[in-house]
Amino acid sequence: MSITDPTFLAFSELQRADYRRALPQRLAQIELLWNQVLNYESAVQALAALERCAHSLTGSGSTFGFAGMGRAARELELAVHLLVHAACALTCAARTEVSQAIELLQRSLIDERAIRGITS
């Protein structure tokens, strides 16, 4: 099967549509995890899960046609990585950096959806 095969192209489009539909839920999960961190609710586990979520979007964003979102997810991943692996304190500056990275990620999805004319 080649990449120009109609069956493959239809399958790829279905995969992209499924991915696109799942993005709002994935962003909601990121927000939930960040709120857990800010409220000191299993903060260590929440930070690790947040890093995994961001990493997943980093890699999959470009694959499914959301390159801007993938870049924004990478910024979030890097900000959280420092907190997880460098044992940095959750300072005001760190909170601001991660919060801004999450906002950028949210805006990037809105921008990419607007470019494609997607309403749902």
Image (cartoon, grey):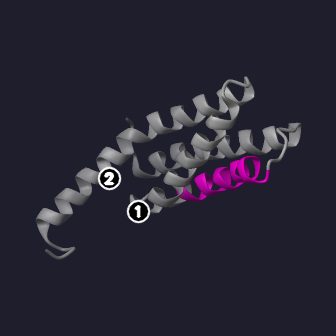
Quadrant (top left/top right/bottom left/bottom right) for the C terminus: top left
Question: Whole-percent x and y of residue 84?
Answer: 71, 47
Residue 66 percent coordinates (x, y): 46, 56
Q: Which mark is residue 63?
A: 1
Using a 10 Å C-alpha cutoff, classify the residue at mark 2 as few (fewer than 14 neighbours), some (14 to 19) or many (20 or more).
Answer: some
**Residue 99 included in the magenta stretch of the image:** no
Query: In the displayed structure, does residue 117 sit left or right of residue 92?
Result: left
Disc 1, SS = helix
Q: Which region shows up in magenta?
A: 69-86
Q: Report if residue 78 lies within the magenta region.
A: yes
Given contact means CB atoms under 8 Å apart, are the residues at marks 1 and 2 in contact? no
Residue drawn at 87 percent across, 42 percent down:
93
Separation of residues labelled 1 and 2 (CA atoms): 9 Å
Residue drawn at (69%, 32%), measured in percent from left and top? 43
Q: Which residue is mark 2?
A: 16
Residue 12: x, y in percent? 25, 59
Q: Nearer the viewer, residue 44 or 109?
A: 44
Instruction: Name the residue type under label 1.
Output: Thr
Disc sitting over residue 99 in the figure: none
Q: Residue 106 in the image: state x and y as whole percent.
A: 58, 41
For the point 25% across and 56% down, the residue is 13
- The tag earlier along the polypeptide, 1 or 2, is 2
**Location of residue 44 (image quadrant):** top right
Name the foreground residue: 115 vs 39.
39
